[in-house]
Structure formats: C-alpha cells, structure tokens
Image: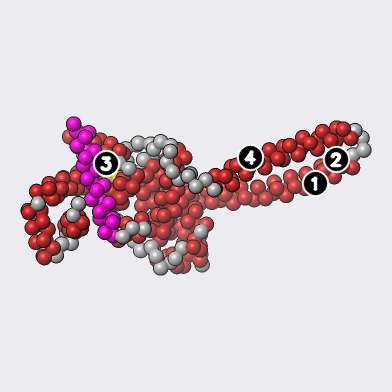
Amino acid sequence: MMDNKVSARTISKKKSKEFEVLVKDNMKRAYFSALEFLGSHDAAMDVSQEAFIRAYRSFNKYDTKRNFFTWYYKILRNLCLNFIRDSKNRKEEFFIETRKNEVSQNNPGETLEEKEELEMLHNAINQLETEDREIIVLREFEGYGYEEISEMLNLPAGTVMSRLFYARKKLAEKMKGLME
Amino acid sequence: MNERFIILLEKYFENELTDSESQEFETLINSNAKLKQEFEEQNRIKEVLRKMKLKNPSREVWDGYWLGIYNRVERGIAWIAISIGAIIFFGYASIEAVNSFINDTHTPPIVKLGISILVFGALVLIFSLLREKFFTSKHDKYKEVQR
C-alpha cells in the first residue's frame, strides 16, 4: 500500500494541488471500498467523491503521522452507512469478475462453470451483513493487511482475524445454501 | 471456535507460519476432526475468492474522477456565494418592505393587522418546520438503529 504521509504533511502549503495528488493516489481504493458497501457504480462514484470533499474540508483534523487512506476510510464508511440507511435498499450490480478477464482481453470469456461460480459468489456476498461483506472485500479483494484493517475499523488485529474467519464461514454457508 | 486455530489459520493463508507454528497448526488440525473440516472449508472459499477480483471501471472514469471532485467543490463555493448574496439582498428588501408598510398611510389599519398576522403565522410555520428538520433529526438517538 502506498504511504501518503509525506504528501499529506505538505498539503497546508499547496492544499489544492497536493490534495489532487492524494485523491489520484487513493481514488481507486476509495471507489472500490464504496462499491462494496453500496453495490452500485454510480452510488460508489458519488459517495467516494463526496467523502473526498469532506476530507478536504476537515483536513486540519488529519494527523499527518497516520496513513491518509485509513483516516479517509472512516469518513467514507460513515457516508456509505448513511447512504444505505437513507436509500433503504442496496443496489445489487455485479461488482466482481473473474481474474481470467484481466489476463487476456481476447479470451472468449468465462466458462459456464465460472459464470455460475461468479454469480453464486456475488449473490452470497450480497446476502452477507454489511460488516461481514466489508471485511471480506477489504482483505480478500482489496488486499489490505490485518494491521491496516484493524486501524480502519478501530478493532484489534486478533478481532479482525476472528471476524474474517467467521465472515468466510458465513460466505461458505451462503454459497452452500445457493448450491442446494 | 479455538482462537489459536483462527490466528494460525490466518497466518497459514499469509504464508507467515514459523516452523514451530506450522507444526502446532498441523497437530491441531490432525487431532481434531472439526478443525480439519473448518480448515478445508476455509481453504475452499479462499480458493474461490482468489479467482475473483473487483470490477474495474473504464479508464475514462478515472480520468474524470478528480474533475468531478473539483467541479463539486467549485459549485459548492458558487452556492455559498449565491446564498450569501441572496441573504443580503432579501434581508435588505425585507427591511425596506417593513419600513414602507409601517409608513404607508393609505392602507386601512384592519388590512395592516391582517397582513401582520399572516406574516407572523408564516414565520412561525417556517421556524417550526426548520426546527423539526434540523434540531429533531440531530437529536434523534435512534436514527442509527435500522428499523
């Protein structure tokens, strides 16, 4: 993961320009994090951008010794939870795909079996509670380490491991349920 | 569930087990059928997850991302300027309107009284609605509870 501490420290000098750099360094992670909560491309774009605007406004509260994204993630998470609460229902667009697609663009696509597996995983993930889905996506899709997740969610690393274990277990059960 | 097993399992997935931990982990799963079953289940789901990734939007989306934020900030500033201008303008216009209404000798007193009551009622109504919207929702301790 990229460390933004140096960029963040100098932001008071050329706030706008530096913030642009921070946004560009973190926009993909921000978008994917919002996408996992909201399940919709448009909502993820909207909310992740709004979170950057809020981060910009309260940048004086940011402790430059800490990683920018973990601080930003707390703003984003709150906005996403508010968005879900206000919009009542979560959209369920497909937000995952098989890794095969990134290896070769000329590939005719996923096999039927892979498509079924993808659909099943997608449905199972969508059936999970927000907290379980969040931790699965952070660890398994976005590749954050336990320490990073622990800082993002304000949880001890041991609890992160434990939550991850139970979230995967629930996911396996949901998938089993969908197979039957 | 055995907490030690969970920690060792996560370390196993990360390839971070030391030799002694590796041995401990093996002993754990080989001596307990339930843990072995859990291990196999977690392994299977890990395999499925490894094959998937988050859908990446097109390059154009990323190209326009910063511009989207910039535009929103710019429009936010524009709205603040418009609001300040409107408050000054309508504030001044209201004071002038009240002054000319008070100094107007042509309007009969009963009409003046009627207009005053109407304006008073409208102001109370607006205040009540604003209080409900901002004050009450801010102090609703159950608003985070999913109903």
The magenta stretch is A157-180
Q: Name the N-terminal-most of marks 2 and 1.
A: 1
Q: Mark 2 near mark 1, Cβ–Cβ under 8 Å?
A: no
Q: Vertical placement of A108 versus A145: above or below?
A: above
Q: Name the N-terminal-most of marks 4 and 2.
A: 2
User: Are the residues under marks 4 and 2 on the same chain?
Assistant: yes
What secondary structure is found at the residue carrying circle 2?
helix
Q: Which residue is mark 3?
A: A97
Q: For the residue marked with disc 2, what is the amino acid?
A: Phe
Q: Which residue is mark 4?
A: B129
The quarter holding residue B137 reads top right
The 10 Å Cα crowd at callout 2, few under 14, some 14 to 19, many 20 or more, is some
Which circle marks residue B101 in the picture? Answer: 2
Q: Which residue is mark 1?
A: B95
Q: Residue at x 68, y 38 (%)?
A: B125
Which of the two residues, A73 or B29, is positioned nearer the viewer here?
Answer: B29
Q: Residue at x 8, y 58 (%)?
A: B27
Where, quadrant-wise, is the N terminus of chain A in this rendering? Answer: bottom left
Q: Residue at x 46, y 51 (%)?
A: A51
> What secondary structure characterizes most of the magenta part?
helix
